[in-house]
Amino acid sequence: MDTIAPLHETGARSLARTDLDAVVAIDARLEGRTRRAYFERRLASALRDPSLHLQLAIDDGDGLAGYVLGRVADGDFGREALALRLETIGVRPDAKGRNVGGRLLDALAAKAVKRGIRELRTAARWNDHSMLRWLDEHGFALARNHVVERPIDSSEIDAPVDRPVTLEAGTGPGREIDYGAPEGNDYERLARDTCDVRSMTRADLGDAVRIDRASTGRDREGAIGRKLAEALEESGLRVSLTARLDDVIVGFLMARADLGDFGRTEPAAVLDTIAVDPAYQHRGVGHALLSQLLLNLGALRIDRVETVVAPRDLGLLGFLFDVGFVPSPRLPFVRALG
């Protein structure tokens, strides 16, 4: 008769480099395909900058029984409070039914609270009934944010044309910002041709912080600097761009392209941040940045980009809908901590 290997009483521990093969094997059994490159990057990133990651494991007599990967969400789209993003969780099939996932999640939450983090966030498809049930059982609730996405195909983002603007920049609830309003009488050029869009470099950090401060009213140099460092050190993970007009950086965006987080099995990218200098609004800068981003992601064979928008950010939401984003089948969830 088969016996069940007992879970170790020591509970959860930090995931180690030596766990990689076991993590990849468990994930491959669950997903039906290997995502080794994804887990290699996540483990390497956590070892390089542990302050931004929480990666835990639980063992039993047969080895690794389960794992969970979490990442600190620091300043995404102007969010002030730190949150921990639950990226992926996996339990060895023969270890299921012993609350391995629940124990991992509780350990993750406890360690997050010790770091001063008060929210655990994740997302799941509306028809992934087993995951939705699991999230409900473990204290998650539907978040108020909007998740929107856009397919990356052969269609281009045109240069914006004149049309009525409902809300002026900086007005309305939450000081909505106009991220890429119309440039008059420009019907033929593609959006990225309206200004000079380039990959972001370390030398661009000061300008990005300046633009972000002008847009949000806060100094987020640390958060933006960490994302830029990640973009330069993990070129397969992040795509960051700047836009120039009059030989001055007037806008930037930061996105990450990855295969695996939130349980994704298809290539996808996430747009974290986009900002335009208020002095250069109404000149198509936001459209140019998004157009070049889609071109770059298409070259990486990424077929979809998504982002999360706070309910008060009506200006940003309107801009994204204007450039082809639509509501995503993935729903956002949040669990309060502490």
Image (tube, grey):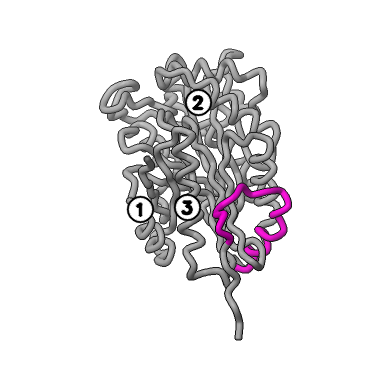
Pointer 1 residue: 139
The verdict on residue 20 being magenta is yes
Question: Which badge, 2 or 3, comes first in the chain's sequence?
Answer: 3
Q: Label 1 is placed on what type of residue?
A: Gly
Residue range (magenta): 8-29
The mark total stands at 3
The residue that appears at 58% across and 60% down in the rendered structure is 8
Quadrant housing the N terminus = bottom right
Using the numbered discs, state the Cα–Cα distance from disc 2 to disc 1 in whole angstroms.
41 Å
What amino acid type should be assigned to the residue bearing mark 3? Answer: Leu
Which residue is drawn at the image coordinates 40% and 64% (left, top)? 127
N-terminal label among 3 and 1: 3
Camera-side mark, 2 or 3: 3
Badge 3 local density, few (<14 within 10 Å), some, or many (20+)? many
Query: Which residue is under mark 2?
Result: 285
At which x and y percent is residue 152? 55, 48
Q: Secondary structure at mark 3?
A: helix
Q: Earlier in the sequence, mark 2 or mark 1?
A: 1
Residues 3 and 44: in front is: 3
* SS at badge 2: helix
Q: Amino acid at mark 2?
A: Val
In the rendered structure, are the residues bearing label 2 and label 1 in contact, judged by CB atoms less than 8 Å apart? Answer: no
From the viewer's perspective, tell me whether residue 104 is left or right of residue 216.
right
Reply yes or no: does residue 205 show up in magenta: no
Q: Residue at x 61, y 47 (%)?
A: 14
